[in-house]
Image (spheres, coloured by chain):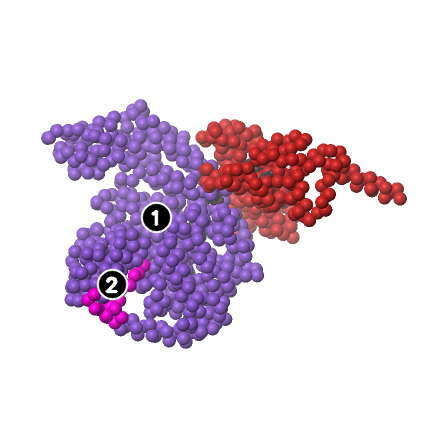
Chain colours: A red, B purple
Amino acid sequence: MPEIIIDGRRLKCEEGETVLDVCKRNRIEVPTLCYHEAIESWGGCRLCMVEISHPKWPGWSNWVTACLYPVQDGLVVGTNTTRVRRLRATVLDLLLARCPNSSVIQKLAAEYGVEDTNYEPRLDGDNCILCGLCVRVCDEVIGVTAIGTANRGASKEISEPLKEPPVDCIGCAACAYVCPTDVIQVIQTPDYRVIWDRTFDMYKCVECGISHITVEQKDWLIAKDNLPADYYDLCDICKRKHTAEKQKELSML
Amino acid sequence: MRFNNIKQLEEHREQALKNQQKVKNTILVCGGTGCLASGARDVEDELRKQLAEQGIDMEVELQVKITGCHGFCERGPIVSFIPSGILYEKVKPKHVEEIIEKTIKNDKIVTKLIYKDPATKKKVQQYEEIPFYKHQTRIALRNIGQLDPTSLDDYLVRDGFKGLVKALGMKPGEIVDEIDKSGLRGRGGGGFPTARKWKSCIKAEGEKRYIICNGDEGDPGAFMDRSIMEGDPFDVLEGMIIGAYAIGCEEGFIYVRQEYPLAVVNLRKAIDILREVGLLGENILGSGLNFDIKIARGGGAFVCGESSALMKSVAGKIGEPRAKYIHSTEKGLYDLPTVLNNVETFVNIPIIIEKGGDWFTQFGTEKSRGTKAFALVGRVNNTGLVEVPMGITLRELIFEIGGGIQKGREFKAVQTGGPSGGCIPNELLDLKVDFDELTEQGSMMGSGGMIVMDERTCMVDVARYFLDFLKEESCGKCVPCREGLRQLTALYDRIVAGYGTLEDLDKIEWLAQDVMIGSLCALGKSAPNPVLSTIQFFRDEYEEHIRDKHCRAGVCKALTRLVIHDECIACGKCIEVCPTDAITGAKKTVHVLDQEKCIACGSCVEICPVDCIKVEPVKVAGEVAS
Ligand SMILES: Cc1cc2nc3c(=O)[nH]c(=O)nc-3n(C[C@H](O)[C@H](O)[C@H](O)COP(=O)(O)O)c2cc1C
Ligand code: SF4
Ligand code: SF4
Ligand code: SF4
Ligand code: FES
Ligand code: FES
């Protein structure tokens, strides 16, 4: 089993883990903006950069993203060196210039000593930091690929295909859920949900009547996972209640 | 026709040689992109037509061939003759009659068509005597301009497939050892040792392996790879076949830049021919090797030339780089072990195998063996494609081969390595051109672009120009590159508009350093090179822009005030060229330039015969254009 040293602590790890995995398990704080446990690491925000070196190569050091860098036995990691803090401050400064109104970015930037951006703020933009989580969750986790990116470089943006409401979207709102800066608007009423300029009817729990899933999402999941047609008739709470009751019955027997 | 074994191939080579020897004269018409654009096809047609009319036997007496680019593209269409070695430039159909009469029938020269050396203004008859050509050592470009790129026979006559024949008699490991011995390093930019790359792919586990040739050549000024793919496609393919045999792979791709249609046509023809004769496909030359090559068209973005983006693009996805903490030799195309090499790297392979790794080491330096092709452009007298041994000095390259600076002006800097290369100043002209020396000076070998700049170039403007290009070409995935380059450009905009402060300059340096360390792929990591190198070597120019509101080269319009000095001879030429009628003057009086009307286009400076129009600082801050 490989062992690595993070900020002076010798830590055991599993083969195939990333530096960030080890940090998380050991409660070592590393900021991230484009990372999510359920989604493959991507390395776009560059906030999780750490400094590495290795006794095997004296004099060598490098800066890598913790969310992607695989552990190797003997690796020495600094998560909070002066250079790492400077890099993060610059990344956050740049993001603050991009999204001056985002409270999430303001707060993070302040932690790295950036109160006001040193760069030219974008005045007409939204709070999207282009972390790509929404696109990736939709593609990798939901399996729908309803949204994507358009353009490149400074004019890159998250977009619906053809700039029309995305036809493939099932209204699951996973994208809105993972968005770190709350850019994706969701309007929720008992009967419908509006997201990406589309309105989705809600499917109601047959028992308590609470809407818990969109009709499209229900149909999609049933088709995708080959589930019985009534699988989503109960909401999670009622489902749990039923299970508990069943268990009770069984234990009384 | 199909070669089932090596013997049949060699027999065919013999036959091709005999056929070739029968021909008394060959006329080579350059069919490179440049010459085609200036009308090479019309010249070819006219030649064929008139030769036919005159009943000259095209099988025996004379051959007309369309070849690849010689590297003199600006002077095209180029026509040359074998065996006499005569070279004509700027040939038009109307010249054909005279050429046939004099050169072909009577071995005489058509003087007006002879190549004129732009530096010395001397006419040079022989191909080999042209200074631009004489100092070159052609290995990668050895066949270009010398053969018909779509003729297998031509290629065989010039020793084609001798490398493969030899390779098939070796063990795969021995091939890699031979490459190792040659010291060959990748020509696509990074200079990674080719043998080490191949070895690591051989070691990697996977149910199959891929080999890819990188012909994306996104560097705007470069055209080495295009010339090779257009002018010597069999060579590229032979290199790939040898590579496939060495690493054990059955499927290869050649990724060709979107804008290179002729390269695609010629490669496709070559692939078809090789499939037909059994040099691609199953059981190549009876050796048991199965290998085929497909052409993949480029994604149309600079970043698609980056290895991980390229592999995504080949797989039909958006060309966005990924972190390469796991090398693509282990997890490349479709997550399988993959070797990616540049076009020029591949064309070095057959000749290294044929002549041996030791032979290759006689060229170049200890750590950078062999030669490198460059696209020499900018303010030099001879521009074009050059191939030189590594270790040649910049001075030799620019002044001997390039023939020095245009109009006898002063050399200022040379930018090597494409848009993200650094600028190297006068003091370092004796720097040896190889992978490590250039990197040490904050530049790089890159693709082999080489842009020469003179005193009329503004270094601040140069850095801004390349930044702007890279900002547009950034894929936008990671923050330092996407946002950082945007902010750097904004800071430059302030400086060239006259609002810059010394604090802005510090900010530029600080941010550039972070973009360099923090970016995901080599595009972002190298984008600060032009910024940091111009600040390092030309800091005074930056400070002049900021403090004195002065652009000494007269390029940044807002910081340029043109003044006519007393040496004016009142010739009136400046009045004629000024597009805004800003200059007035009578006979025998020093002309006057109206600052209000002047747009600092510099036309008058260019035309003034006594150089009396000078660039001066913009006097007061209020004069700075908004
Ligand atoms: C932005 C960017 C663009 C690149 N473009 C090219 C290219 O057009 N052609 C090329 O051969 N290599 C290009 N490269 C380098 C490739 O990533 C890769 O290193 C090379 O193809 C490997 O071949 P070699 O080992 O033979 O040099 C580029 C790299 C970057 C970062
Ligand atoms: S709401 Fe639509 S776009 Fe968002 S993740 Fe779900 S399917 Fe994709
Ligand atoms: S919308 Fe949100 S999740 Fe999507 S890229 Fe922008 S910041 Fe990230
Ligand atoms: S460095 Fe630039 S080109 Fe490379 S991944 Fe980041 S944004 Fe894309
Ligand atoms: S969390 Fe690692 S780069 Fe964004
Ligand atoms: S195209 Fe003819 S010399 Fe380049």
Q: Which residue is mark 2?
A: B48
- Please report, as a chain letter, where disc 1 is located: B
Q: Where B355 falls versus A56 (above or below)?
A: below
Residue B326 placement (x, y as % from top left) = 54, 52
Q: CA distance from mark 1 to mark 2?
A: 34 Å
Main SS of the magenta part reads loop
Seen from the viewer's position, the closer of residues A80 and B204 is B204
Q: Chain of mark 2?
A: B
Q: Residue at x 46, y 59 (%)?
A: B294
B312 or B535, which is in the foreground?
B312
- Say which of B502 and B20 sits in front: B20
> Would you place residue B302 above or below residue B355 in this image?
above
Tell me if residue B483 is in the magenta stretch.
no
Query: In this orientation, which residue lies closer to the viewer: B615 or B544?
Result: B615
Q: Which tag is nearer the camera, tag 1 or tag 2?
A: 2
**Element under disc 1:** loop
Q: Is residue B602 left or right of residue A230?
A: left
Residue at position x 64%, y 33% from top?
A192
